[in-house]
Amino acid sequence: MNSVLKIEKKYADSITNLALDTLKNNKQALIFVNTKRSAEKCAEEISKKLKQSNKELTDLSTQSLKAVSKPTRQCKRLGICLEKGIAFHHASLHAKQKDLIESNFRKGTVKIICCTPTLAAGLDLPAFRAIIRDVKRYTNRDMVNIPVLEYLQMSGRAGRPNYDTYGEAILVSSSDGQKDELFEKYVHGEPEEIYSKLAVEPVLRTYLLSLISTKVINTNDQIINFFSKTFWAFQYKDMNQLKITINKMLKLLESWEFIQFTDNKFRATVLGKRITELYIDPLTANQFVINLEKASNQIKPIALLQLVCNTLEMRPLLRVKLKEYDDFQEEMSRYEQYFLTDEPSMFDPDYDEYFNSFKTSLMLNEWINEKDDDYLMNQYDIGPGITRMKIETANWLLYAAYEIARIQQKQDILKEIIKLKYRLRYGVKEELLPLLKLKQVGRVRARKLFRANLKKLSDLKKAKPELLAQIIGSKKLALDILDQVGVKIETNNNKGQLSDFSQRKV
């Protein structure tokens, strides 16, 4: 046990020493690790070794904290690291924080970024070194080696042509015995083959419906001829298997009434064309069609949230941990009477995903009831970045559900979907919706106005300017809000004193 601990400490020290050496040479580096927690821990360990800080870094730290209305513990950790010019970067960060880190890395203010492999693709950053600490990652079953292609992506971040004449990719070994093995596998290794995913059912049914909807193909011969020229056909040279899969998908789309076969031609129905335009999986669309038929104007927000969370598009879902199982079972028993989707048997292979969809929908339900990022992180272990991604995906799926309900002429639930979309966008209770019509008023300011008994736009018209400025915390914004509701305010001087307001309705 002691020898393992010594190896791990030496391993951690070597990463910190490489980072310090990079800074000594006035260069920048990306350090790739396999988990979000490791990225944060790695950044913290390096920042502890540094003493220098300046006003620019202090301002940067402050900006990162302001990315969310109430900083989470993750935000505070990032702020401490940024004060030393070190950052961590992963999916849980808010988009504003990620942009802040990337832009300041380009400027040279941030010198080291400890990150997950998501930063290895699509970004051109001035990293002289790409330090790869972890070559294993967690899967559902076990720890596995990363592909050679992934190693090449990460090492390819070093020495970008726009910034350096050369770069250094450093693959860190935890022991001398592992060094030769890693060198042979990754430095001398051949990249893996790339395989077509066309025959995967969600992909194939989506493209088939799209091609038929846009009239690119509409007969059996055209369909087979088109797919015979794809990379899938070239790679596998097994058109018989592809034909079987295509025919299966065509029958499925017909049974869902997204396409029709008449006069020896396939044609998309009105619903089928709209599904193509919405870019959702036809399977998801069919689930919406079936379940929205059960809905009424008494539908609860949690029912719509669970409906959109129980889709392939929302994955990966928040996982119910073993220690949480009983608690979430109890919570689900409170809400299941409102659900539109049918709960599978506990012995069904899909049950875990259904259960996870409930946890995800419950998190979103907390968001629309004005729980902040700090609460969601503590309760659901979800960072602001992932929260925003789930909100955006859910909003897109709610819009798709709205369009399907409109075609179904389910007028009674359209209003409920629209209200939920707005609540999800701003993270508010329904009572705040009237105030959100105002520009520069979000969940925090709207709640302040509501607590001051300014609940509607008509209430604001009667509000005293001094009081409104005090509630909002900004004279300029108070003037703007009054202007939006049709009240003009003139000041007796330009010094901005609250006592200098005079009111004139227009």
Image: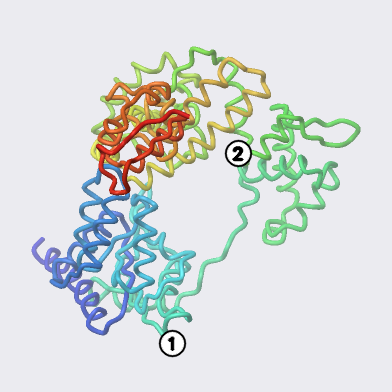
Q: Is residue 298 positioned above or below 112 on the image?
A: above
- Tell me which residue sits at (34%, 53%) in the image: 138
The percent position of residue 145, horizontal first and vertical second, equals 38, 62
Q: Amino acid at mark 2?
A: Ile
- Tell me which residue sits at (20%, 64%) in the image: 83
- Residue 137 shows which numbered tag? none
- Tell me which residue sits at (91%, 32%) in the image: 263
Mark 1 vs 2, N-terminal side: 1
Q: How is the image coloured?
A: rainbow
Dot 2, how many residues are within 10 Å of its Cα: few (below 14), some (14-19), or many (20+)? Answer: some
Q: Is residue 18 positioned above or below 274 on the image?
A: below
Q: Quadrant of the N terminus?
A: bottom left
> Residue 279, located in which quarter of the rendered image?
top right
Give the Cα separation between the discs numbered 1 and 2. Answer: 44 Å
Q: Nearer the viewer, residue 456 or 283?
A: 456
Q: Specify the farthest residue to the right.
A: 263
Left or right of 347 on screen, residue 404: right
- Determine which residue is flagged by label 1: 165
Determine if residue 185 is in view: no
Q: Amino acid at mark 1?
A: Thr
> Residue 26, located in which quarter of the rendered image?
bottom left
Q: Nearer the viewer, residue 279 or 141?
A: 279
Q: How many marks?
A: 2
Determine if residue 115 is in view: yes
The percent position of residue 227, horizontal first and vertical second, equals 75, 52
Left or right of 390 on screen, residue 1: left
User: Element type at marker 1?
Assistant: loop
- Determine which residue is flagged by label 2: 280
